[in-house]
Amino acid sequence: MTGQDDGGGIRDRAGTLAVLMIAPAIAYIVAMIGVPLLLAINYSLSDATTGDPVHHYAGLVNYRSALADPVFRLALKNTFVFALVSQSIVIVLSRVLASALSMPFRGKWAVRFLIMLPWTAPIALGAIGWLWMYDSIYSPFDWLYRRAGLLGKPGDPFGPMTNIYWLGRPTLAMASVVIVHVWRLLPLATVIQLAGLSAIPGEILEAAEIDGARGWRKAAWITIPLTLPIIGIAFLFGIIFTFTDMTIVYILTRGGPVNATQVLATWTFFKGIEGGDLAQGAAISLFMVPVLAGIAALLLRMARRAEVT
């Protein structure tokens, strides 16, 4: 009798229960990520198009063609610029916002709600709103600058023209897209950093204040080192979202002017879907895989080291 009871049910077998619990998640990941990845690799080694999707092996021709394409190289560079610049700004601003929101003040819930709005709103609607604000004729930014005497007359700081044409100049278009990326991802990074600040034991902060560490000194020596793993996670999520997002660039500039804001995600869409070259689009998209995998491994390793120390 005792021997039979020792076997127990499945709930008493930790290893078997763990496998059963994690199996749906693994199956979902394989179905949603693994299968499309294998299909993309298969297409990238072929000459498939939307007119003739039949697979004919073509080797590495699509990869060599992509590397030889100046637009692809520009898109690759722009992708890194957008990701690194926007996320650097997001990390700094989210730290400032998280520090402010961690302090007690009246109306904190309303401020948190307003900060979270860009993340909860559909990105397509948000991007269309920004497209209106960057309009070459009716931009409210230009109107404010004209009212403030900064634009519209000879000698004004922003020039004598009545409009700035935000999305019509390469440098301004790139800055405009970065600003929208920052606006989009700032709420998520703020929530992540706020969670990290809330997890710091109160005794450590009290001891630091007793020792005279306040303001920037407390941030530099206490809160930032203790939340470095959280900062790494926020940066990692932001890099991944920026690298793989095409909505903002597609709606605002469609990669223009003259491919100045073209990124890998949009160039993949234009080549593979609008251009009809499925093989070329698949090859371009796969250039993001090793980059994102390398960034993820590096940041997770940094976060683990910081957590251990």
Image (cartoon, helix red, strand yellow):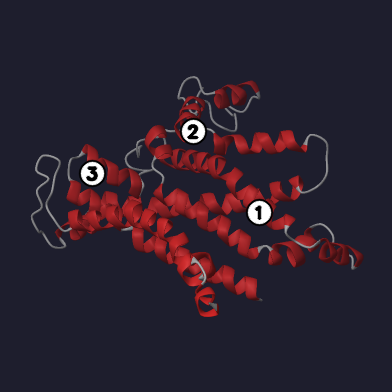
Q: Quadrant of residue 144?
A: top right
Q: Residue at x 38, y 42 (%)?
A: 246
Q: Which mark is residue 193?
A: 1
Q: Which residue is mark 2?
A: 122
Earlier-in-chain disc, 2 versus 3:
2
Q: Is residue 65 left or right of residue 187?
A: left
**Residue 201 as seen in the image, left or right of residue 26:** right
Instruction: Between label 3 and label 1, give the one nearer the viewer.
Output: 1
Distance (Cα) linking label 2 and label 1: 23 Å
Quadrant hosting residue 63: bottom left
Q: Amino acid at mark 1?
A: Gln
Residue 48 spot, x, y in % from top left: 13, 49
Q: How many marks?
A: 3
Q: Position of residue 107 (x, y in %)?
A: 79, 34
Q: Amino acid at mark 2?
A: Pro
Q: Residue at x 49, y 38 (%)?
A: 176
Residue at 42% x, 36% y: name it. Answer: 169
Residue 153 shows in this picture: no
Secondary structure of the residue carrying tag 3 is helix
